[in-house]
Amino acid sequence: MKLVPKWLETGWQDLTHPISRVLIGAGVRPNHLTTFGILLILAAAVFYGSGHVRLGGCFLLLSGWTDILDGQVARGGGMATKFGAFYDSTLDRVGDGLTFIGIGSFFLLYPGDIAWRQGVVVLCMVAVMASLLVSYARARAEGLGLDGKVGIAQRAERVLGLGLPSMIFGAGQRGIILSAIVLVLTLLALITVVQRFHWVYQQTEGAKAP
């Protein structure tokens, strides 16, 4: 089960197919799009950190759109490579870290005294760890020949769940909305890690049980 329904994900991918065909015709390489995507995330992190939270959310959503396009260009243009997959996956992890570092910087440098802002900075650290664990658990499961895509919150949910509400609502009064978003995403990521641990156990040790 995923929080982003399959019909929404499929519908959005269908909308981007004409754009990917144009990019293929223009000779754009998927690694170019991957690199452009991480630059968008870097811009998002800077905007989050400097207090321009709505712009941060906008650029984060754009990076997610680019993440879809690079896969479509790779497959549609016959340019899928092992290095491209490695490059894309690695930069996705960099992007996860940059996003929460930017948000943590926002609360660290927040003007005025907020008693709980240090707690939010620590929460952002936990969010980085949780997002990396979600990805690592999938990679390790697939390395064992298992399906690692189980869980309610994968990268699409994290990008959409952070980018859309922060673009619409901003940080909120005293940063309460942004901190609540980070808390919810962190909990969902931790739940996803537990789900993947349970799934792998069921397919390995659990499968041996009488």
Image: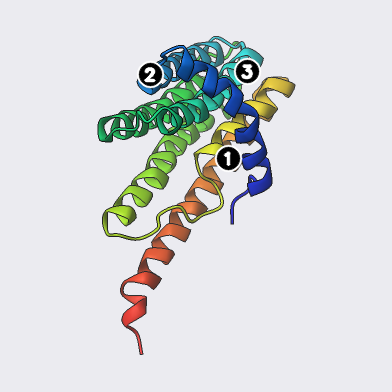
- Circle 1 SS class: helix
Earlier in the chain: of badge 3 and badge 1, it is: 3
Quarter of the picture containing the N terminus is bottom right
- Report the amino acid beneath label 2: Arg
- Given residues 153 and 33, the one toward you in this image is 33
- Circle 2 SS class: loop
Q: Residue furthest front?
A: 25
Residue with the mark numbered 1: 157
Residue with the mark numbered 2: 29
Q: How busy is the neighbourhood of tag 3: few (under 14 within 10 Å), some, or many (20 plus)?
A: many
Observer able to see residue 107:
no
- Circle 3 SS class: helix
User: Residue 20, how many percent across, how many down?
Assistant: 53, 23
- Report the amino acid beneath label 1: Glu
Earlier in the chain: of badge 2 and badge 3, it is: 2
Quarter of the picture containing the C terminus is bottom left
